[in-house]
Every structure is written in C-alpha cells, then in structure tokens.
Amino acid sequence: MDWQIVLYIAAGIAAIAFLVLCIAIAVVLFSVKKNLDHVASTLDGLDGQIQGITRESTDLLHKSNRLVEDIQGKSEKLNAVVDAVQGIGYSVTNLNDSVDRVTNSITHNISQNEEKISQVVQWSNVAMEIADKWQIRQQQRNRAYNKVNVDGQSENL
C-alpha cells in the first residue's frame, strides 16, 4: 500500500498544481482581457479622432482648391496688366527714340546755321540798342515838353 498512498499523494499534488496553474492562467487572462478592453477603447477614441482629422483634411483640401482657383484667376488678370505695362514700355521707348531724333536734328541744324544764328543775335542786339535809344529820346522829349508846359503855366499864373 505504500505505493498507493504515494500515488494518491502524487495525484493530489498534481491536482493542486493543476488548480494553481488554472488560477494563474485565469489571473493572466483577466489581466490580458483588461488590457485588451483598454486597447479597444483607445482604438475607438483614435477612430473618432481619425474621422475628425479626415473631415478637417477634406475641408482644408476644398479650401486649397478654391484658393488655387482664385490665384489662377488673379494671375490671369495680372498677365493682362503686365502686357499693358509692356505696351507702355514700348511706347516710352518709341517716344525716347523720337525725342532723340528731334534733338539730333535740331543740334545738326543749329551747327549748320551757326553763322546765321550769330548774325541774328547781332542784329537783335542792334535792334535792342536802337529801341533803347529811341525810348531815351522819347523820355527826353516828354521831359522837355512837360517843362515847357509847366513853365508856360507858371508864367500865366
């Protein structure tokens, strides 16, 4: 009977070990379940956040598309302004060329007619001197006339 007692004791120890093992596995499984529940709730929160981010990204994409369209429209309008400014630049260049041609023509004509111009200046100086002398004579005559009138009136008084 010795062996039977040993077998019963061994079976009891095995049963107790199996029970301890089952209890340990149950504790581990409950801990894993708790962690998985926490992970599931975190994933639910992430799902909501991802949906919010997706909505915001979609709105941002629509706004970006409207902004790109607006910029394209303004760019086309700006191209018209740039073309107009370029046309003004061409006109100013043509005007400058015309002014240069006129200036060169005047300079050329002045250099060709330099002697005639100096004669005109001399004659105009002579004419101005004659006019000045004429005015001086007129003033002298007026003074003399006024003097005679004043003297003649004083004799009558």
Image (cartoon, grey):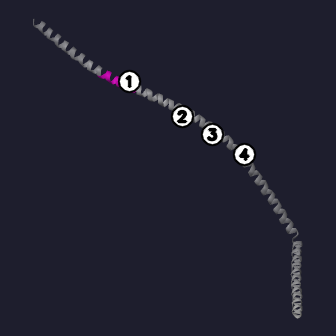
Query: Which residue range is magenta in the image?
Result: 31-42
Q: Residues within 10 Å of mark 3 (few under 14, many from 20)?
A: few
Label 4 close to label 3 by CB (< 8 Å): no
- Residue in the picture at 38% in, 25% down: 41
- Graded by Cα atoms within 10 Å as few (under 14), some (14 to 19) or many (20 or more), the crowding at tag 1 reads few
- Tell me where residue 100 appears, x and y as whole percent: 80, 60
Instruction: Name the residue that disc number 1 marks.
Output: 40
Magenta stretch contains residue 138: no
| Residue type at tag 2 | Leu
Is 98 left or right of 134, judged from the image as shown? left
* N-term-proximal mark, 1 vs 3: 1
Of callouts 3 and 2, which one flags the residue occurring earlier in the amino acid sequence? 2
To which residue does mark 4 refer? 83
Q: Which residue is mark 3?
A: 71
Label disc, if present, on residue 82 of the rendered structure: none
**Amino acid type assigned to the residue bearing label 3 in the image:** Ile
At label 2, counting other C-alpha atoms closer than 10 Å, the crowd grade (few under 14, some 14-19, many 20 or more) is: few
Q: Residue furthest left?
A: 1
Name the residue at 26% across, 20% down.
Answer: 27
